[in-house]
Image (cartoon, rainbow, N blue to C red):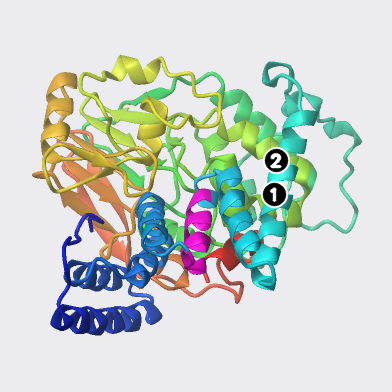
Amino acid sequence: MSNNAEITGPVSQEDIEAAEKLKNEANEFFKKQNYNSAIELYTKAIEKNSKNAVFFANRSIANLRLENFGYALSDASKAIELDRAYTKAYYRRAAAHMFLGKYKLALKDFEYVTKVRPNDQDAKVKFNECNKIVKKIAFEKAISVDKKEVNLADSINLDVMTIEDEYEGPSLEDGKVTLKFVTELMEHYKQQKKLHKKYAYKILIDVKAYLQKQCSLVDIKVPDDEKFTVCGDIHGQFYDLMNIFQLNGLPSEKNPYLFNGDFVDRGSFSVECIFTLFSFKLLFPNHFFMSRGNHETLDMNRAYGFRGEVTSKYTAHMADLFTEVYNWLPLAHCINNKVLVMHGGLFSKDDVTLDDIRKVNRNTQPPEDGIMCELLWSDPQPMLGRSPSKRGVGCQFGPDVTERFLQHNGLEYVIRSHEVKNDGYEVAHDGKCITVFSAPNYCDTMGNLGAFITMTGKDLTPKFTSYEAVPHPDVKPMAYANSFFNFLCQ
């Protein structure tokens, strides 16, 4: 839903009343967590009366809930433009800045509120908490040395880590992942037990060593008569991941999988998800594939719970190692030279080639623009051409952009993830751009189905399997997230 709709000039009393009614209807949808419908009605209210800052601020918070940080930012800024004293609008804009990793800009908004409302205790709390995050990040940068000199994986001494006699969980065999280990690990996790830290560290070290040898674009060959499965976002929903394997079979050399990013964050079983997936990667390196998503990044992990979860279940040191490992995840995969799979989408300029993707230096946190950023963050749109991203990062691309990219690279279609869809998938751009999202009832609130895609090597025709969420232990999503980020969206 675009944020552009508004009117100029005088507003009639009739329009003011109609807009207020639309806003009240939107508020009801918002309370029911139906944010898309709320945004539609806030937009209609703005079309009737674009002079009311509340409408923009309300649409801003709805967009925040949908992670449309770009739209949330512009709406909050518009609300401030209309009413400089409207405190909530500053909070909304600060929240959008924080979720985009622009902490210093967020701090400026909180600071402004504390100055104009010096007795506002809520503003002081938010300013102080944001200031702590800014100082912590500055401190981390100050004590870190040049990245090329830092290699956490090489600094870990597994020999000094002992396996306690009382540990009854799965064990690596001669330091290697086996099918027995992965099978026992999944059962261990279902019982809400923890993998020993020595094995956890070994898996991370081995996965990093393997991924470092990969290209930024990995080519996959699927034989004519074999099935291949593509899954979208998992987001820490371990029990739904187990359901995928129940429905579609465990990964194997005869049942290969590609998981297309966003394995972690939001859901509070992200540690269980990532160690299961990394174990399968080590077990079947040529038949199990993993793409980097926008949530396999430091800023997202800080905000949405993964870093907190790893620190709680293990250590902050291991959380740092995850960041190091994620930097080596491939950015895209190409199936039989015909289907390109990436987490986000296509590019802000034409003429990008598969070789351009192969040449990307991915061992870094994603930049704010360019090929790597857009592979992780971009989204399709129904209209032709390109638009600024609703997320504030990447771009939105139309069916003509998709068609030109496919023709230029000799491809048939693209698969991407990155967005919740009611059926778990969506076919757009005349069948040339497919979205797959594999986390059903996302965050325990969205009510969506999850889905995965299967195809055979012979014709690469996508087949969709949708499924409902399964029960999980009573641990709420975002349980390990920084409480301040949750607070921002209240």
Image quadrant where one finds the N terminus: bottom left
Q: Nearer the viewer, residue 302 or 466?
A: 302
In this rendering, the answer to whether 401 lies above or below 241 is above
* Label 2 Cα crowd, 10 Å radius (few <14 / some 14-19 / many 20+): few
Visible residue check, residue 481: no
Could you tell me how far apart the alpha carbons at marks 1 and 2 are, in whole angstroms? 6 Å
Q: Secondary structure at mark 2?
A: helix
Q: Nearer the viewer, residue 2 or 410?
A: 2
Q: Quadrant of residue 72?
A: bottom left
Amino acid under label 1?
Ile
Q: Is residue 362 magenta?
A: no
Q: Nearer the viewer, residue 475 or 462?
A: 475
Percent across and percent down for residue 110 are 60, 57
Visible residue check, residue 96: yes
Which residue is depicted at the point 83% across and 33% down? 158
- Residue 376 is left or right of residue 407, and the answer is right
Judging by the rendered image, the residue that carries numbered circle 1 is 133
Which residue is depicted at the point 40% across and 29% down? 369
Which residue is depicted at the point 26% across and 56% down? 3
Judging by the rendered image, the residue that carries numbered circle 2 is 137
Q: Verify CB contact (< 8 Å) between mark 1 and mark 2.
A: yes
The main secondary structure of the magenta stretch is: helix
Percent across and percent down for residue 176 are 67, 34
Q: Quadrant of residue 304?
A: bottom right
Q: Quadrant of residue 396?
A: top left
Q: Nearer the viewer, residue 191 or 215?
A: 215
- Disc on res. 486: none
Amino acid under label 2?
Ile
Residue segment shown in magenta: 85-97
